[in-house]
Image: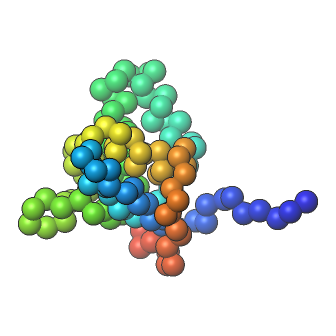
Amino acid sequence: MRKTNNRIRDGYDYRGIIEPSEGFHEGIEFTYRPVLAEDADAVYSQQIKEGNAAYHKLLRETMAEHLIEWSEWDGEKMAEITPEAVGKIYPNELFWSVWNIMTGVSPNKDSVEADTKNSSEG
């Protein structure tokens, strides 16, 4: 049997890149801590328990908690990562692509593990 290593290494960040789509969106680059299955399931179950508004609120909060930096610019400086800012990622395809990369649902051909542990880990 071959040896594999498909587990997240604690404390490490990953880089996501979504290339621009001409006439649709400018693309986005971001560094993130992966959203593990248990956390993603908590977001998904929120829709069943509390409805769409609560689901989308927790979705934005979870994304903001796991995003470390991004390429979003507010015209004068890098845009702060907040649930409100995350919720404004548009078009929707780009929003869901970021989420799917963060949760490991979609592959990210350019995703690489960061060289150093993130500062929020011990």
Residue 119, percent from left and from top = 41, 73
| Residue at image point 49% right, 63% down | 110
Across the whole image, how many numbered discs are drawn on residues? 0
Q: Is 8 situated left or right of 86 in this image? A: right
For the rendered model, the colour scheme is rainbow
Quarter the N terminus occupies? bottom right
Residue 16, percent from left and from top = 43, 60
| Residue at image point 50% right, 41% down | 40
Residue 120, percent from left and from top = 42, 68
Q: Is 16 situated left or right of 3 in this image? A: left
Q: Residue furthest front?
A: 22
| Residue at image point 51% right, 78% down | 115
Q: Residue furthest bottom?
A: 115
Q: Residue furthest right?
A: 1
Q: Relative to the observer, which residue lies in front, 43 or 2?
A: 2
| Residue at image point 44% right, 21% down | 49
Question: On screen, 58 above or below 98?
Answer: above
Q: Relative to the observer, which residue lies in front, 85 or 118?
A: 85
